Amino acid sequence: MYVCSCFGITEKQVREHAASGACTPRQIAGACKAGTDCGSCVRRIQELLGRGSCPRRELVNQGTSSPVAALTAGAA
């Protein structure tokens, strides 16, 4: 089923991007442009992502890892 009619993005594609690490609608948009035109699909993308579905967010909440710290450490 299509989630984003503007760019022809399906639920399967959103789930694949989420499995690859896209945890927010903004990250999904960066991966495939879904939600960047009319925006009517953003709520559905949020539903597909669900709460707590991002492993990186869970690590940050536990104090185990920080994506920002990892990025700045890699730039040094």
Image: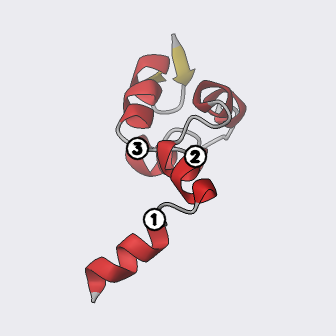
* Mark closer to the chain start, 1 or 3: 3
Image: 60 above or below 21: below
In the rendered image, residue 35, in percent from the top left (x then y), is placed at 59, 41
Given residues 26 and 52, the one toward you in this image is 52
Task: Using residue 46 as the reference point, say whether residue 64 is left or right of it.
Answer: left
Residue visible at 51% across and 10% down in the picture: 1
User: What amino acid is at disc 2?
Assistant: Thr
In the rendered image, residue 49, in percent from the top left (x then y), is placed at 59, 31
- Residue at which label 2 appears: 24
Q: Secondary structure at mark 2?
A: loop
Q: CA distance from mark 2 to mark 1?
A: 14 Å
Query: In the image, which disc is placed on residue 67?
Result: 1
- Callout in the foreground (1, 3): 1
Query: In the image, which disc is placed on residue 34?
Result: none
- Quarter of the figure with the C terminus: bottom left
Q: CA distance from mark 1 to mark 3?
A: 11 Å
